[in-house]
Protein backbone atom coordinates (compact mmCIF):
# COMPACT_ATOMS: atom_id res chain seq x y z
CA UNK A 1 0.00 0.00 0.00
CA UNK A 2 1.32 3.44 -0.87
CA UNK A 3 1.68 5.60 2.19
CA UNK A 4 -0.06 8.96 1.94
CA UNK A 5 2.10 12.04 2.40
CA UNK A 6 2.91 12.48 6.06
CA UNK A 7 1.10 15.34 7.75
CA UNK A 8 3.11 18.29 9.01
CA UNK A 9 2.94 21.28 11.35
CA UNK A 10 1.76 24.59 9.99
CA UNK A 11 4.32 26.59 11.94
CA UNK A 12 7.40 25.97 14.04
CA UNK A 13 5.63 27.62 16.97
CA UNK A 14 2.92 25.00 16.59
CA UNK A 15 5.48 22.23 16.93
CA UNK A 16 7.15 23.88 19.93
CA UNK A 17 3.90 24.56 21.76
CA UNK A 18 2.75 21.01 21.12
CA UNK A 19 6.00 19.67 22.60
CA UNK A 20 5.72 22.02 25.58
CA UNK A 21 2.09 20.95 25.92
CA UNK A 22 3.13 17.32 26.04
CA UNK A 23 5.78 17.97 28.67
CA UNK A 24 3.71 20.29 30.84
CA UNK A 25 1.17 18.00 32.42
CA UNK A 26 -0.15 16.64 35.65
CA UNK A 27 3.40 15.66 36.59
CA UNK A 28 4.36 19.33 36.78
CA UNK A 29 1.47 20.34 38.99
CA UNK A 30 1.19 17.23 40.99
CA UNK A 31 4.61 15.85 41.65
CA UNK A 32 7.37 18.37 41.21
CA UNK A 33 6.81 20.72 44.13
CA UNK A 34 6.02 17.83 46.42
CA UNK A 35 9.17 15.90 45.53
CA UNK A 36 11.22 19.11 45.78
CA UNK A 37 9.97 20.04 49.23
CA UNK A 38 10.73 16.54 50.48
CA UNK A 39 14.03 16.26 48.72
CA UNK A 40 15.99 19.31 49.85
CA UNK A 41 14.08 22.37 48.61
CA UNK A 42 16.25 24.79 46.67
CA UNK A 43 19.12 22.28 46.74
CA UNK A 44 16.86 19.79 45.01
CA UNK A 45 15.82 22.36 42.44
CA UNK A 46 19.45 22.97 41.50
CA UNK A 47 20.21 19.25 41.29
CA UNK A 48 17.10 18.83 39.17
CA UNK A 49 18.30 21.49 36.74
CA UNK A 50 21.67 19.78 36.41
CA UNK A 51 19.91 16.53 35.57
CA UNK A 52 17.66 18.25 33.04
CA UNK A 53 20.73 19.72 31.34
CA UNK A 54 22.81 16.54 31.40
CA UNK A 55 20.12 13.93 30.69
CA UNK A 56 16.84 15.56 29.69
CA UNK A 57 17.97 17.94 26.97
CA UNK A 58 20.36 15.49 25.25
CA UNK A 59 17.74 12.76 25.21
CA UNK A 60 15.00 15.05 23.97
CA UNK A 61 17.37 16.27 21.25
CA UNK A 62 17.92 12.63 20.27
CA UNK A 63 14.20 11.97 20.06
CA UNK A 64 13.75 15.07 17.92
CA UNK A 65 16.64 13.99 15.68
CA UNK A 66 15.26 10.49 15.17
CA UNK A 67 11.78 11.86 14.46
CA UNK A 68 12.89 14.40 11.89
CA UNK A 69 15.34 11.98 10.32
CA UNK A 70 12.89 9.11 9.82
CA UNK A 71 9.62 11.02 9.40
CA UNK A 72 7.70 7.97 10.35
CA UNK A 73 6.07 6.59 13.48
CA UNK A 74 8.51 5.69 16.26
CA UNK A 75 7.25 2.10 16.12
CA UNK A 76 8.54 1.83 12.57
CA UNK A 77 11.53 4.14 13.03
CA UNK A 78 13.18 1.82 15.55
CA UNK A 79 13.18 -1.02 13.07
CA UNK A 80 14.30 1.20 10.25
CA UNK A 81 17.29 2.46 12.21
CA UNK A 82 18.31 -0.55 14.24
CA UNK A 83 17.12 -3.49 12.19
CA UNK A 84 14.86 -6.28 13.32
CA UNK A 85 16.43 -6.59 16.76
CA UNK A 86 15.28 -3.06 17.63
CA UNK A 87 11.69 -3.43 16.49
CA UNK A 88 10.47 -4.41 19.99
CA UNK A 89 11.57 -1.00 21.29
CA UNK A 90 9.02 0.58 18.98
CA UNK A 91 6.34 -1.65 20.47
CA UNK A 92 7.50 -0.82 23.97
CA UNK A 93 6.78 2.84 23.11
CA UNK A 94 3.24 1.97 22.06
CA UNK A 95 2.72 -0.12 25.19
CA UNK A 96 3.90 2.80 27.35
CA UNK A 97 1.57 5.13 25.47
CA UNK A 98 -1.41 2.93 26.25
CA UNK A 99 -0.26 2.27 29.79
CA UNK A 100 0.26 5.89 30.77
CA UNK A 101 -2.81 7.14 28.94
CA UNK A 102 -5.01 4.62 30.72
CA UNK A 103 -4.35 5.99 34.19
CA UNK A 104 -3.44 9.54 33.21
CA UNK A 105 -6.91 9.89 31.76
CA UNK A 106 -8.47 8.79 35.05
CA UNK A 107 -6.64 11.49 37.02
CA UNK A 108 -7.41 14.01 34.29
CA UNK A 109 -11.06 12.98 34.64
CA UNK A 110 -10.93 14.00 38.32
CA UNK A 111 -9.69 17.46 37.31
CA UNK A 112 -12.67 17.83 34.95
CA UNK A 113 -15.04 16.76 37.69
CA UNK A 114 -13.50 19.20 40.17
CA UNK A 115 -13.71 22.05 37.67
CA UNK A 116 -17.34 21.32 36.83
CA UNK A 117 -18.42 20.89 40.44
CA UNK A 118 -16.64 24.06 41.50
CA UNK A 119 -18.78 26.06 39.10
CA UNK A 120 -22.03 24.45 40.14
CA UNK A 121 -21.86 23.91 43.90
CA UNK A 122 -20.04 25.09 46.97
CA UNK A 123 -16.86 23.18 47.70
CA UNK A 124 -17.81 20.27 49.99
CA UNK A 125 -16.70 20.62 53.59
CA UNK A 126 -15.26 17.14 53.70
CA UNK A 127 -12.83 17.28 50.79
CA UNK A 128 -11.30 13.92 51.69
CA UNK A 129 -14.67 12.18 51.52
CA UNK A 130 -15.46 14.00 48.28
CA UNK A 131 -12.19 12.85 46.79
CA UNK A 132 -12.91 9.25 47.76
CA UNK A 133 -16.28 9.47 46.01
CA UNK A 134 -15.11 10.94 42.74
CA UNK A 135 -11.73 9.23 42.41
CA UNK A 136 -12.91 5.67 41.89
CA UNK A 137 -15.96 3.72 40.87
CA UNK A 138 -18.76 4.80 38.54
CA UNK A 139 -18.08 8.53 38.81
CA UNK A 140 -14.43 8.06 37.89
CA UNK A 141 -15.37 5.85 34.94
CA UNK A 142 -17.68 8.54 33.56
CA UNK A 143 -15.12 11.33 33.83
CA UNK A 144 -12.38 9.09 32.41
CA UNK A 145 -14.54 8.31 29.38
CA UNK A 146 -15.42 11.98 28.92
CA UNK A 147 -11.79 12.99 29.05
CA UNK A 148 -10.81 10.32 26.53
CA UNK A 149 -13.65 11.53 24.35
CA UNK A 150 -12.17 15.03 24.23
CA UNK A 151 -8.72 13.58 23.50
CA UNK A 152 -10.08 11.49 20.62
CA UNK A 153 -11.95 14.49 19.25
CA UNK A 154 -8.77 16.58 19.05
CA UNK A 155 -6.71 13.77 17.50
CA UNK A 156 -9.40 13.21 14.86
CA UNK A 157 -8.60 16.68 13.53
CA UNK A 158 -5.06 15.59 12.66
CA UNK A 159 -1.81 17.47 13.19
CA UNK A 160 -2.56 20.95 11.87
CA UNK A 161 -6.26 21.24 12.43
CA UNK A 162 -6.46 19.12 15.55
CA UNK A 163 -3.36 19.16 17.71
CA UNK A 164 -1.79 22.41 16.52
CA UNK A 165 -5.00 24.36 16.79
CA UNK A 166 -5.70 22.99 20.25
CA UNK A 167 -2.28 23.86 21.66
CA UNK A 168 -2.21 27.33 20.11
CA UNK A 169 -5.40 28.05 21.99
CA UNK A 170 -4.80 26.16 25.21
CA UNK A 171 -1.16 26.74 26.08
CA UNK A 172 -1.32 30.55 26.29
CA UNK A 173 -4.43 30.20 28.43
CA UNK A 174 -2.63 27.77 30.70
CA UNK A 175 0.33 30.14 31.15
CA UNK A 176 -2.01 33.01 31.90
CA UNK A 177 -3.93 31.03 34.52
CA UNK A 178 -0.71 29.85 36.13
CA UNK A 179 0.73 33.34 36.42
CA UNK A 180 -2.54 34.75 37.69
CA UNK A 181 -2.81 32.07 40.35
CA UNK A 182 0.82 32.57 41.41
CA UNK A 183 0.22 36.31 41.80
CA UNK A 184 -2.89 35.65 43.89
CA UNK A 185 -1.05 33.09 46.01
CA UNK A 186 1.70 35.60 46.74
CA UNK A 187 -0.82 37.86 48.50
CA UNK A 188 -1.84 35.20 51.04
CA UNK A 189 -0.74 35.61 54.62
CA UNK A 190 1.07 32.28 54.65
CA UNK A 191 3.00 32.95 51.45
CA UNK A 192 6.40 33.44 53.07
CA UNK A 193 6.04 30.33 55.23
CA UNK A 194 4.89 28.35 52.19
CA UNK A 195 7.81 29.41 50.04
CA UNK A 196 10.20 28.66 52.88
CA UNK A 197 8.88 25.15 53.32
CA UNK A 198 8.94 24.51 49.56
CA UNK A 199 12.42 25.85 48.97
CA UNK A 200 14.37 25.76 52.25
CA UNK A 201 17.72 24.42 51.05
CA UNK A 202 18.86 21.22 52.67
CA UNK A 203 22.12 20.13 51.09
CA UNK A 204 22.34 17.07 53.31
CA UNK A 205 19.37 15.49 51.56
CA UNK A 206 21.26 15.48 48.27
CA UNK A 207 23.80 13.05 49.68
CA UNK A 208 21.01 10.52 49.74
CA UNK A 209 21.37 8.74 46.40
CA UNK A 210 17.68 7.99 46.27
CA UNK A 211 16.84 11.63 45.91
CA UNK A 212 19.00 12.02 42.85
CA UNK A 213 17.46 9.03 41.15
CA UNK A 214 14.07 10.39 42.12
CA UNK A 215 14.98 13.70 40.54
CA UNK A 216 16.09 11.92 37.38
CA UNK A 217 12.86 9.93 37.26
CA UNK A 218 10.79 13.06 37.76
CA UNK A 219 12.68 14.96 35.06
CA UNK A 220 12.19 12.08 32.70
CA UNK A 221 8.44 11.75 33.24
CA UNK A 222 7.91 15.48 33.20
CA UNK A 223 9.72 15.90 29.89
CA UNK A 224 7.64 13.13 28.23
CA UNK A 225 10.76 11.17 27.35
CA UNK A 226 11.26 7.48 26.75
CA UNK A 227 8.20 6.53 24.74
CA UNK A 228 8.52 8.25 21.41
CA UNK A 229 6.17 11.13 22.12
CA UNK A 230 8.73 13.80 21.30
CA UNK A 231 9.93 11.65 18.41
CA UNK A 232 6.39 11.51 17.02
CA UNK A 233 5.96 15.27 17.17
CA UNK A 234 9.32 15.83 15.47
CA UNK A 235 8.37 13.38 12.72
CA UNK A 236 5.82 15.95 11.55
CA UNK A 237 8.52 18.62 11.08
CA UNK A 238 9.10 19.76 7.54
CA UNK A 239 11.23 22.78 8.19
CA UNK A 240 14.87 22.59 9.19
CA UNK A 241 16.02 24.15 12.42
CA UNK A 242 18.11 23.89 15.55
CA UNK A 243 16.74 20.86 17.38
CA UNK A 244 19.09 21.38 20.34
CA UNK A 245 17.65 24.81 20.89
CA UNK A 246 14.11 23.49 20.56
CA UNK A 247 14.77 20.84 23.19
CA UNK A 248 16.20 23.51 25.48
CA UNK A 249 13.15 25.72 25.02
CA UNK A 250 10.84 22.82 25.87
CA UNK A 251 12.87 21.79 28.93
CA UNK A 252 13.11 25.33 30.32
CA UNK A 253 9.39 25.93 29.83
CA UNK A 254 8.55 22.64 31.48
CA UNK A 255 10.74 23.39 34.48
CA UNK A 256 9.37 26.92 34.80
CA UNK A 257 5.79 25.70 34.93
CA UNK A 258 6.62 23.04 37.53
CA UNK A 259 8.50 25.57 39.64
CA UNK A 260 5.75 28.19 39.51
CA UNK A 261 3.08 25.57 40.26
CA UNK A 262 4.89 25.03 43.58
CA UNK A 263 4.68 28.77 44.21
CA UNK A 264 0.90 28.50 43.81
CA UNK A 265 0.38 25.45 45.99
CA UNK A 266 2.57 25.98 49.04
CA UNK A 267 1.23 29.37 50.18
CA UNK A 268 -2.31 27.97 50.17
CA UNK A 269 -1.28 25.04 52.31
CA UNK A 270 0.48 27.22 54.84
CA UNK A 271 -2.11 29.98 54.95
CA UNK A 272 -4.83 27.54 55.89
CA UNK A 273 -2.75 25.27 58.06
CA UNK A 274 -3.28 22.24 55.87
CA UNK A 275 0.13 20.64 56.34
CA UNK A 276 -1.61 17.69 57.99
CA UNK A 277 -3.94 17.11 55.04
CA UNK A 278 -1.21 16.85 52.48
CA UNK A 279 -0.59 13.32 53.63
CA UNK A 280 2.11 11.23 52.12
CA UNK A 281 1.15 11.69 48.52
CA UNK A 282 1.19 14.55 46.11
CA UNK A 283 -2.32 13.60 45.00
CA UNK A 284 -3.49 14.34 48.54
CA UNK A 285 -2.00 17.82 48.35
CA UNK A 286 -3.76 18.68 45.11
CA UNK A 287 -7.15 17.07 45.44
CA UNK A 288 -7.75 17.20 49.18
CA UNK A 289 -5.69 19.89 50.89
CA UNK A 290 -6.00 22.61 48.25
CA UNK A 291 -9.80 22.51 47.87
CA UNK A 292 -10.09 22.58 51.66
CA UNK A 293 -8.08 25.81 51.62
CA UNK A 294 -10.18 27.31 48.84
CA UNK A 295 -13.38 26.35 50.68
CA UNK A 296 -12.47 28.46 53.68
CA UNK A 297 -12.27 31.57 51.47
CA UNK A 298 -15.91 31.70 50.44
CA UNK A 299 -16.86 33.03 47.02
CA UNK A 300 -13.34 34.07 46.07
CA UNK A 301 -12.21 30.56 46.95
CA UNK A 302 -14.74 29.03 44.57
CA UNK A 303 -13.44 31.17 41.70
CA UNK A 304 -9.83 30.27 42.41
CA UNK A 305 -10.79 26.61 42.79
CA UNK A 306 -12.42 26.61 39.35
CA UNK A 307 -9.49 28.36 37.68
CA UNK A 308 -7.03 26.02 39.33
CA UNK A 309 -8.71 22.85 38.11
CA UNK A 310 -9.30 24.29 34.64
CA UNK A 311 -5.56 24.88 34.52
CA UNK A 312 -4.90 21.27 35.54
CA UNK A 313 -7.31 20.07 32.87
CA UNK A 314 -5.52 22.08 30.16
CA UNK A 315 -2.17 20.69 31.29
CA UNK A 316 -3.56 17.15 31.17
CA UNK A 317 -5.31 17.32 27.81
CA UNK A 318 -2.32 18.72 25.94
CA UNK A 319 -0.27 15.80 27.32
CA UNK A 320 -2.90 13.17 26.63
CA UNK A 321 -3.11 14.07 22.96
CA UNK A 322 0.59 13.33 22.53
CA UNK A 323 0.19 10.00 24.32
CA UNK A 324 -2.63 8.93 22.03
CA UNK A 325 -0.86 10.26 18.94
CA UNK A 326 2.05 7.85 19.54
CA UNK A 327 -0.39 4.95 19.40
CA UNK A 328 -2.37 6.35 16.48
CA UNK A 329 0.60 7.11 14.26
CA UNK A 330 2.00 3.61 14.83
CA UNK A 331 -1.29 1.99 13.92
CA UNK A 332 -1.76 4.22 10.85
CA UNK A 333 1.69 3.23 9.64
CA UNK A 334 1.47 -0.45 10.28
CA UNK A 335 -2.16 -1.13 9.43
CA UNK A 336 -2.46 1.48 6.72
CA UNK A 337 -5.78 2.66 8.18
CA UNK A 338 -7.14 6.19 7.95
CA UNK A 339 -6.61 8.57 10.86
CA UNK A 340 -10.28 8.47 11.57
CA UNK A 341 -10.59 4.75 11.85
CA UNK A 342 -7.37 4.38 13.83
CA UNK A 343 -8.30 7.11 16.27
CA UNK A 344 -11.76 5.77 16.97
CA UNK A 345 -10.61 2.17 17.37
CA UNK A 346 -7.53 2.83 19.49
CA UNK A 347 -9.17 5.61 21.44
CA UNK A 348 -11.81 3.02 22.30
CA UNK A 349 -9.15 0.53 23.36
CA UNK A 350 -7.58 3.18 25.61
CA UNK A 351 -11.00 3.78 27.16
CA UNK A 352 -11.25 0.09 28.03
CA UNK A 353 -7.68 -0.06 29.33
CA UNK A 354 -8.46 2.76 31.74
CA UNK A 355 -11.37 1.01 33.42
CA UNK A 356 -9.40 -0.91 36.09
CA UNK A 357 -7.56 2.27 37.11
CA UNK A 358 -10.89 4.10 37.29
CA UNK A 359 -12.28 1.45 39.60
CA UNK A 360 -9.34 1.11 41.87
CA UNK A 361 -6.78 3.75 42.86
CA UNK A 362 -4.33 1.11 44.08
CA UNK A 363 -4.29 -0.36 40.59
CA UNK A 364 -3.74 3.15 39.26
CA UNK A 365 -0.76 3.69 41.56
CA UNK A 366 0.78 0.34 40.63
CA UNK A 367 0.41 1.07 36.94
CA UNK A 368 2.16 4.41 37.43
CA UNK A 369 5.02 2.66 39.21
CA UNK A 370 5.45 -0.01 36.52
CA UNK A 371 4.98 2.12 33.41
CA UNK A 372 5.73 5.68 34.52
CA UNK A 373 8.68 4.90 36.76
CA UNK A 374 10.19 1.89 35.06
CA UNK A 375 9.19 1.12 31.45
CA UNK A 376 9.58 4.75 30.39
CA UNK A 377 13.10 4.85 31.73
CA UNK A 378 13.86 1.54 30.05
CA UNK A 379 12.63 3.05 26.77
CA UNK A 380 14.83 6.10 27.27
CA UNK A 381 17.85 4.01 28.15
CA UNK A 382 17.45 1.89 25.01
CA UNK A 383 16.89 4.99 22.87
CA UNK A 384 20.17 6.43 24.17
CA UNK A 385 21.98 3.17 23.38
CA UNK A 386 20.54 3.08 19.86
CA UNK A 387 21.32 6.72 19.09
CA UNK A 388 24.66 6.87 20.93
CA UNK A 389 26.10 3.53 19.89
CA UNK A 390 24.44 2.37 16.71
CA UNK A 391 23.59 5.38 14.61
CA UNK A 392 25.64 8.16 16.18
CA UNK A 393 27.18 9.40 12.94
CA UNK A 394 23.89 9.60 11.10
CA UNK A 395 22.23 11.25 14.07
CA UNK A 396 25.00 13.80 14.37
CA UNK A 397 24.75 14.60 10.69
CA UNK A 398 21.02 15.18 11.11
CA UNK A 399 21.64 17.39 14.13
CA UNK A 400 24.18 19.37 12.11
CA UNK A 401 21.28 20.61 10.05
CA UNK A 402 20.57 23.49 12.40
CA UNK A 403 23.33 23.10 14.96
CA UNK A 404 26.44 24.58 13.39
CA UNK A 405 28.75 24.47 16.39
CA UNK A 406 30.95 21.37 16.32
CA UNK A 407 31.68 21.75 20.03
CA UNK A 408 27.98 21.63 20.86
CA UNK A 409 27.42 18.57 18.72
CA UNK A 410 30.41 16.82 20.29
CA UNK A 411 29.10 17.61 23.77
CA UNK A 412 25.72 16.21 22.85
CA UNK A 413 27.29 13.04 21.40
CA UNK A 414 29.36 12.50 24.54
CA UNK A 415 26.40 12.96 26.83
CA UNK A 416 24.11 10.64 24.87
CA UNK A 417 26.83 8.00 24.49
CA UNK A 418 28.11 7.82 28.04
CA UNK A 419 26.36 10.00 30.60
CA UNK A 420 22.72 9.34 29.72
CA UNK A 421 22.93 5.52 29.58
CA UNK A 422 24.94 5.26 32.79
CA UNK A 423 22.65 7.51 34.80
CA UNK A 424 19.51 5.89 33.42
CA UNK A 425 20.88 2.45 34.23
CA UNK A 426 21.33 3.55 37.84
CA UNK A 427 17.79 4.90 37.94
CA UNK A 428 16.50 1.63 36.48
CA UNK A 429 18.27 -0.45 39.10
CA UNK A 430 16.79 1.75 41.77
CA UNK A 431 13.31 1.50 40.32
CA UNK A 432 13.41 -2.25 39.66
CA UNK A 433 12.34 -3.55 43.08
CA UNK A 434 9.34 -1.21 43.52
CA UNK A 435 8.32 -1.83 39.91
CA UNK A 436 8.46 -5.58 40.45
CA UNK A 437 6.32 -5.33 43.57
CA UNK A 438 3.83 -3.13 41.74
CA UNK A 439 3.72 -5.55 38.82
CA UNK A 440 2.81 -8.35 41.22
CA UNK A 441 0.08 -6.08 42.56
CA UNK A 442 -1.31 -5.60 39.05
CA UNK A 443 -1.29 -9.32 38.36
CA UNK A 444 -3.03 -10.10 41.65
CA UNK A 445 -5.70 -7.56 40.78
CA UNK A 446 -6.21 -9.10 37.35
CA UNK A 447 -6.88 -12.49 38.97
N1 LIG B 1 4.96 14.85 30.78
C1 LIG B 1 3.67 14.56 31.28
C2 LIG B 1 3.48 15.23 32.63
O1 LIG B 1 4.36 15.88 33.14
C3 LIG B 1 3.41 13.08 31.45
C4 LIG B 1 4.03 12.20 30.43
C5 LIG B 1 4.99 11.30 30.62
C6 LIG B 1 3.75 12.17 29.09
N2 LIG B 1 5.34 10.71 29.45
C7 LIG B 1 4.58 11.22 28.51
C8 LIG B 1 2.89 12.88 28.33
C9 LIG B 1 4.55 10.98 27.16
C10 LIG B 1 2.85 12.63 26.98
C11 LIG B 1 3.68 11.71 26.42
O2 LIG B 1 2.44 15.10 33.22
Image: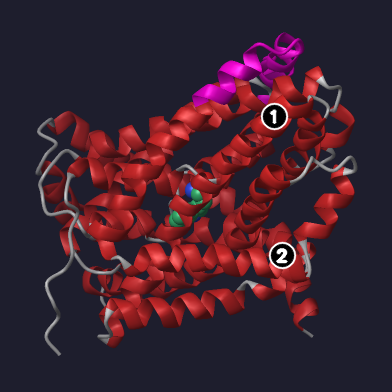
What span is colored magenta in the figure? 179-207
Magenta stretch: dominant SS?
Answer: helix
Q: Name the spot of residue 377 as percent of width and height, x first.
A: 51, 55
Q: Is residue 244 left or right of residue 191?
A: left
Is 227 placed left or right of 127 in the picture? Answer: left
User: Image point 74% across, 66% down: which residue?
Assistant: 139
The residue sitting at 11% across, 39% down in the picture is: 402
Picture quarter with the C terminus: bottom right
- Residue 355: x and y in percent read 67, 74
Label 2 packing within 10 angstroms: few (<14), some (14-19), many (20+):
many
Figure check: 127 above or below 292: below
Q: Residue pushed farthest bottom?
A: 1
Spatial separation of the CA atoms under disc 1 and disc 2: 32 Å
The residue beneath circle 2 is 140
Nearer to the camera, 409 or 422: 409
The coloring applied to the image is secondary structure
Provide the secondary structure element on which disc 2 rests: helix
Between 66 and 328, the one lying in front of the other is 328
Q: Which residue is mark 1?
A: 39
- The relative height of residue 230 versus residue 297 in the rendered view (above or below) is below
The numbered dot on residue 446 is none
Q: Looking at the image, is mark 1 or mark 2 earlier in the sequence?
A: 1
Amino acid sequence: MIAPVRESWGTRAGFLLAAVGSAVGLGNMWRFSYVASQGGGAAFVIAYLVIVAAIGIPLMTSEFVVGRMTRTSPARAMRQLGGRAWAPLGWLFVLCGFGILSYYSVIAGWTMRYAFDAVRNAIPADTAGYFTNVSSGGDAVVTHLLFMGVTVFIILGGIKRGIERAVLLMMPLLFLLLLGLAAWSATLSGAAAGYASYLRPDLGKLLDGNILTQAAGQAFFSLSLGMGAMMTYASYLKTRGDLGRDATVVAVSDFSVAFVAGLVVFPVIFTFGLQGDVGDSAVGALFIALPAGFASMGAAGAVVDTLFFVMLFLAAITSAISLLEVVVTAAMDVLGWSRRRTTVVFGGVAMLFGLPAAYNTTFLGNLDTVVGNFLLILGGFLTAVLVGHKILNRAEAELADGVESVALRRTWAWLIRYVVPVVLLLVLLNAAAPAWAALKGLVTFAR
